[in-house]
Image: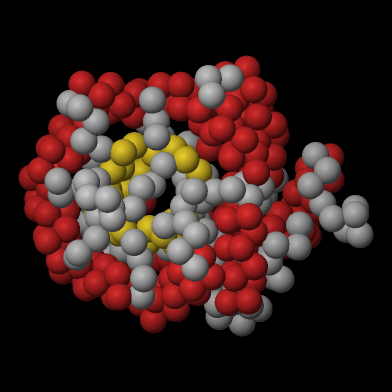
Amino acid sequence: MSASTPTFTGVIPPVATPMLPDHTIDHASLERLVDHLISAGVSGLFALGSTGETAYLTDDQRVAVLRTIVATSEGRVPVIAGAIELTAARTAELAQKLVAAGADAIVTTAPLYTLNSQAEIAEHFRTVAAAIGVPLWAYDVPVRVHSKLSLELLLQLGSEGVIHGVKDSSGDDVGFRRLLAANEAAGRPLTLLTGHEMVVDAMLLAGADGVVPGLANVEAEGYVRLFAAAGRGDWDAARTEQERINRIFDIVFQPAGLSGDATGVGAFKAAMHARGLIDHATMANTVESLDDAAVQRVRGILAELELLPAAVV
């Protein structure tokens, strides 16, 4: 890696995309959110991921969101952007737009919709990497793309220099532990980040380089403290902070009968709105918002943990 290669370790929130009641982008709230996250001590920002509802945005909206995040961050932390599309050609085209808009790195998944072998998926990553002039990361999220990135594939792409790291949202903790061990044995060609928000302490103990927690949009400081405790080897403090975070994470279990997209991001947005971090809890067009009862349960959890502004309590 060159000295100019951006480093993505530590706490790197997948930035939520605030929206106005008409489902357009709320850039004022987005600016406020980015400033809040950086002030909380995060070490990078992940734009246009699942928490950012990127699947519901047009390319123009994706570029506009990224431009706001980049402009607001003012180089204080590096920004990695999700270029997630159907095939390599479409992914590369979007990635080039995001690089032009200021992304320091690109992260992408296996192809969507298509039925590909691991060899074809490898070519997908090689094609995208060749089309951009910034580092490429792999996003392992089989629940969304319906194919798992194998350990062998990731290490091969890492050894080739095609990908610089992996954001693991596979939900496969055994697989991630095996990847951590294999990466170590191979001389650490990859930087490895966990997206599993409730076991960050365990993953850092196992050797993960950082975390990409959607819940950090609600409360980033806890993750920053957890990572710092792990860095100094204070695993009791790390576990205590993780247990506190897990209590906050109970907000995602308050909605009932909603889709996966509506439930997780909806709970985050309801909590962010309750905390005054964004002006509206509006979801992307066609995605349901939480009902009033669920919102009140979310607020109750925040109040119990003293995370609401005094005027709201």
Q: Report the residue at 40% width, 34% height from top.
A: 209
Q: Nearer the viewer, residue 124 or 165?
A: 165
Res 239 quadrant in image:
top right
Q: Looking at the image, can residue 250 be seen?
A: no
Tell me if residue 233 comes above or below residue 264 in the rendering: above
Name the side, left or right, on which 130 lies relative to 55: left
Q: Report the residue at 20% width, 21% height from top.
A: 185
Name the side, left or right, on which 289 lies relative to 148: right
Q: Report the residue at 57% width, 19% height from top.
A: 235
Residue 295 image point, x, y percent: 76, 55
Count of picture labels = 0
Residue 81 image point, x, y percent: 37, 61
Name the side, left or right, on which 185 lies relative to 271: left
Q: Nearer the viewer, residue 301 or 257?
A: 301
Q: Nearer the viewer, residue 308 or 7?
A: 7
Residue 200 image point, x, y percent: 51, 31
Tell me if residue 114 comes above or below residue 227 in the rendering: below
Res 244 quadrant in image:
top right
What colour scheme governs how the chains and residues are painted in the rendered image of this protein?
A: secondary structure
Q: Report the residue at 54% width, 48% height from top.
A: 42
Residue 179 image point, x, y percent: 27, 28
